[in-house]
Image (tube, rainbow, N blue to C red):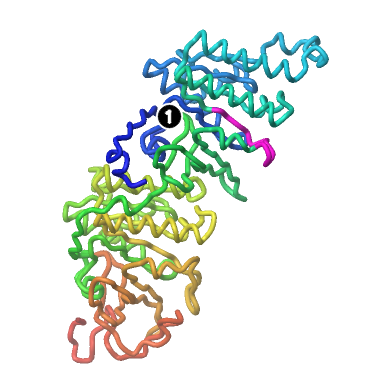
Amino acid sequence: MKPNAASSLNLPVQERVSTGIAGLDAVLGGGLPVSHLYLIEGNPGSGKTTLGLQFLRNGADGGTPGLYVTLSETSEELHTIAASHGWSLDGIEVFELVSNEGLGPEAEQSILHPSEIELGETVNGVMAVVERLKPKRVVFDSLSEMRLLAQNPLRYRRQVLALKKFFATHACTVLLLDDRSATESELQMRSIAHGVIALEQVTDQYGPERRRLRLIKMRGIKYRGGDHDFNLDTGGLFVFPRLVAAEHRVMSDSTTVSTGVPKLDTLMGGGVTRGSNMLFVGPSGVGKTTTAIACVRAALMRGEKAAYYLFDEGLSSLLLRSRALGLDVQPYMRDGQLKVVQLDPAEVSPGEFAQMVRQSVEDDGAHVVVIDSLNAYLHAMPGGKFLLLQMHELLTYLNHRNIVTLLIMGQHGLMGELRSDVDMSYLSDGILLFRYFEARGNLLKAMSTVKSRFSAHEQSIREFRLGPTGVELGQALTDFEGVLVGATVYRGQLPLLGEKNDNKKERA
């Protein structure tokens, strides 16, 4: 259906109710349509109970009565779970279908309690408490227990349909929790429910478990499909909606700004362009991070804000080294103009990282974003394919917002053939190549621009070094050999940095 189809047909706008989870409401496009039944499915530990409690807590905070019907958790366990998140269950009624009386020896005489009677008593008990409390939000935990009582797919389906009709007549918005213990033939619950939200918990070989959320179906509304990362932490679920770059276009700027190093501007064809990204690639220790800091400091001196995401190096060593090279950025951090975020790639999910970047751009007003480095970001991903897809959306989003993005990628090895974890060249608007080279018995450093989509860059190679004044570039050098294979040797006669030519002239 087209976006304006509802208005052109004069269809009523569905009333929504918040889930209490801002990110999930955004995925739903504004919350759950009211007075419907929804299936929340996921393996044990994926966060179903917490989501249900968060949904009821949000309603209770707004004065809406809520009911938690439990067959698998005790009231004490639910109070403990709520307390771990800093919540109380005030305003939420907890109804235990299996009480202490149901656990006595006489309850084990199945001949007196056939499954038909047990299931009927369960359903009637739920209906009775709803009639008494008249809640607007209900959580039923869990369907797997009802499925065991039914012992028959047909009987189970009939009872769920009866509950669905009953809840609808009482204008209840219901979450049915299911632990995915059903067989394929019993998955008809997805067809009965108005919407299905699947929670997934994935454990990698190292690091904490990762959680993802996907909307399997949602009738009558437009929602954001795909996988959405979420965290389960103190305070409940925090969902990070999948980034869609096409939704964030602004007016294009495309102006060129200085890196703060005149000769580097010349090498890059005038500087860096707003709404573009530049990839700094080279071996470890060659000067990529320091060059990025120089670019960031130039932006800060222009009065712009910047966000630096640090995956590899410690913050203290970065600040100490920058200060020693005349690129002190700590005063800008104290003023809030520069935000440096030190991240552990094993602890942050791709969706959470994308949300951090969005907040820096949209809430803090950052004009420059640095990701140091892509190697560590790759390790936060389940695979290289997903890195490229997510990075493509993130870079496109930043370009749409006219952000200058600097990406740092380390290559394996120091000399000889170098290789990268993943090929990012086609996603980059510009590439600045860093290399070690040998000349006159010394190990020196060089950089060259090998790609720029927005400017006519130099085709030459320039020597550079890091000193008390920051990044210093020399004149364009010729007679290099082996640059592309990573075994760069300079056999020319032009003076290097720190040298003078035969005529005693200063180097260009």
Question: Is 187 located above or below residue 423 in the figure?
Answer: above
Give left or right: position of 185 versus 190. right
Q: Residue at x 37, y 51 (%)?
A: 244
Q: Nearer the viewer, residue 292 or 19?
A: 19
**Pointer 1 local density, CA inside 10 Å: few below 14, some 14–19, many at least 20:** many
Where is residue 497 drawn, in percent x and y?
28, 78
Q: Which residue is mark 1?
A: 19
- Place residue 102 in its image quadrant: top right
Q: Residue at x 60, y 32 (%)?
A: 178
Give left or right: position of 263 versus 449. left
In the image, farthest residue toward the front: 9
Where is residue 439 drawn, in percent x and y?
38, 84
Residue segment shown in magenta: 176-186
Q: Secondary structure at mark 1?
A: loop
- Place residue 182 in its image quadrant: top right
Give left or right: position of 388 versus 502. right
Give the number of marks.
1
* 476 part of magenta stretch: no
The quadrant of the rendering that contains the C terminus is bottom left
The amino acid at mark 1 is Thr
Does any portion of residue 257 appear in the rendered image? no
Q: Nearer the viewer, residue 310 or 465?
A: 310
Q: Residue at x 50, y 43 (%)?
A: 214
Question: Is 25 located above or below residue 372 in the figure?
Answer: above
Where is residue 190 drawn, in percent x and y?
57, 37
Q: Nearer the viewer, residue 262 or 234?
A: 234
Does any portion of residue 214 appear in the rendered image? yes
Where is residue 179 drawn, in percent x and y?
63, 33
